[in-house]
Amino acid sequence: MDKPKPRTFRVTSFDVAAEAGVSQSTVSRALAGDPVVSEATRLRVAEAAQRLNYYVDNNAARLRTGKTGTLAVVVICRPDEDRKDLNPFTYALLGSICAAASARGFETLVSFQDGPANFSGRYEEQRKADGLIVIGTTQNEAAWDYYRDLAQSGMHWVCWGSPYDELEWIRSDNHEGARLATGHLIERGCGKIACIASLDSLQRQFQERYDGYADRMERAGLEPWLVEIEDGLSREEQGRRAAQALLASGRPCDGIFAVCDEIALGTLRELTEGGVKVPQQIALIGFDGIRASANAMPPLSTVQPDFAAAGAMMVDKLLAGIAGESHEQRRVPVTLLVRESTRHG
Amino acid sequence: MDKPKPRTFRVTSFDVAAEAGVSQSTVSRALAGDPVVSEATRLRVAEAAQRLNYYVDNNAARLRTGKTGTLAVVVICRPDEDRKDLNPFTYALLGSICAAASARGFETLVSFQDGPANFSGRYEEQRKADGLIVIGTTQNEAAWDYYRDLAQSGMHWVCWGSPYDELEWIRSDNHEGARLATGHLIERGCGKIACIASLDSLQRQFQERYDGYADRMERAGLEPWLVEIEDGLSREEQGRRAAQALLASGRPCDGIFAVCDEIALGTLRELTEGGVKVPQQIALIGFDGIRASANAMPPLSTVQPDFAAAGAMMVDKLLAGIAGESHEQRRVPVTLLVRESTRHG
DNA sequence: CTGAAAGCGCTTACAG
DNA sequence: CTGAAAGCGCTTACAG
């Protein structure tokens, strides 16, 4: 048999107290930066702690205070989707949320959830987090139903991508972004502008973007032209099919606004492979500002939300909720990013 | 003044005990699935817990057991890099790690770190996690130095992307992948094959890939041809510059192996914009299998590591280390992905 | 198979 | 400004 593992002794605040010649409570106060502790004592304690390589046991502190200093972040995926194939927008948002949380002194407990076997949002009840941020694909209805039900319990949370308007959401300024994109095409000289979108009531963001497009078209005296995407395909494939349908219709077209970059990339490939020159024959613009849009051939014009602001806004809204304060801001500002795909010949 | 917030009472195992008519210890055992508890009791307790909407307080359990059931994942970024611009390979790896941890019953505490103000890897000392996984850019030397020093303290950890060979790393099977890529170009008929790479001693992965390339070239009686990337640029820009240098050299070339997809994408754009037809004049292949490689024009051939295996291997190695077991596997298997960029005219 | 009790390592009233 | 003591809510020997 193996030798029994030598019990590893943990350095506690009592050890530091002995080392510094003060009481354990003073150690706790000194290390927490309690201003009531005299500077001399604080220093003596800090040095003792360093000598002993002491760190506060987070579990004990959390148990005592009831606060976790942690935010849970749930990323909703398509069922059985490879993590590699997750929408890059979602990854960027995740990164920005973690950065914002960290800047405010919170840790982030991240989990990817794709099906009922996986759904688990009881972070507050289990005292694993003080609140919850849910982001990810709108298309996983089961997931959103699960979280909508959970929300009834009065948990603290904020989401991005929810198909339901009544939840605590943060979104891009979709109307404004779509107006910018459409206006850009119009100013560039396009008059026959199609919008590749979905009016599916679950796709709130796409609907909002279509509305912004239609709005701007009508303001210019132009007729909105909707090319609907098909359900149940990858975004890229949706973009390809929509482009096929558009070309097959024979209707003249000189500009396309696709409601997300991934759809736009599919559209771009289909157009290019079909011999249509972008932007000379058809100008194309997307929405989201994902990294891959810059690498497309030609580079894709797009509307980009302020990612840093997105993460910050979600975290701030959540923290406000936890503190019992109100927080009205829900729209992340967007910018027009003009690249080759809409530039003048 | 506001009314004082009503103290929210927490349901504890004592409440469940009263509800089920058993002792608190029995509640704990029953809910933990201890087989010593009779089935009838277990059921009664489970029902009582559900009625009261009871969940075990994770902090108390963790304090008592000394285990956190959590793995920390640190993503090393370039200083001040926008989270949106993080290498998509890293995001994919992060997703696969979280999935693997979750499948093994562990939570993941994720943080993005880019500079000394940010470095913080004392997760075990603070009892925030049982071990640590570090991934991210090789280029942040300060970060790797920090973690290399920390590792001296005997913490449990595994990393991906470290410039240092002596650490506990997991990597793609870079030699094999590079041989596959190079062999594919050769079989396709290429004879003048350049490799865009870096032999910088810190870029272990790139070096390994170059070695695999050179190996395969020599086996075919061909002369290796290294085009070095410049330091301190984005990967895409490195790829562009390398392509410029290659074309400017005037040396005939019919195939390029770029040691990562992001470099390859830059190379592809530079070639295309310079009027060089890919793959008709020059065939091009990358490495990493990032999502954007599929969206390039033409779609980029590449070598893809098994992402799911990568996350699983990292988590398994870490858990083995925590359990005091050994775990030898460190190379993630790779597959050749043939797309348009290397297809026959 | 079940219960009474100890103790994980802190934070924070309370007292001085 | 500092200390003695209580208690956060569990898990797990120990006893029966």
Image (cartoon, coloured by chain):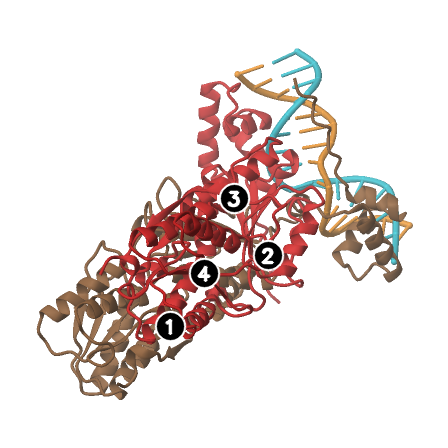
Chain colours: A red, B brown, C cyan, D orange
Whether the residues at callouts 3 and 2 have beta carbons within 8 Å, the answer is: no
Q: Which mark is residue A270?
A: 1
First along the sequence among labels 4 and 2: 2
Q: Are the numbered discs 4 and 3 placed on the same chain, yes or no?
A: yes
First along the sequence among labels 4 and 1: 4
First along the sequence among labels 3 and 1: 3
Q: Amino acid at mark 2?
A: Ser
**Residue A196 screen position, x and y as percent:** 45, 62
Instruction: Give the Cα distance between marks 3 and 2.
Output: 35 Å
Front-most of residues A192 and A281: A192
- Circle 4 is placed at which residue position? A225
Q: Amino acid at mark 1?
A: Glu
Horizontal relation, residue D15 to residue A345: left or right: right
**Residue A187 screen position, x and y as percent:** 30, 50
Q: Quadrant of residue B306?
A: bottom left
Instruction: Give the Cα distance between marks 3 and 1.
Output: 43 Å
- Residue A157 visible in the snapshot: yes
Q: Which mark is residue A201?
A: 2
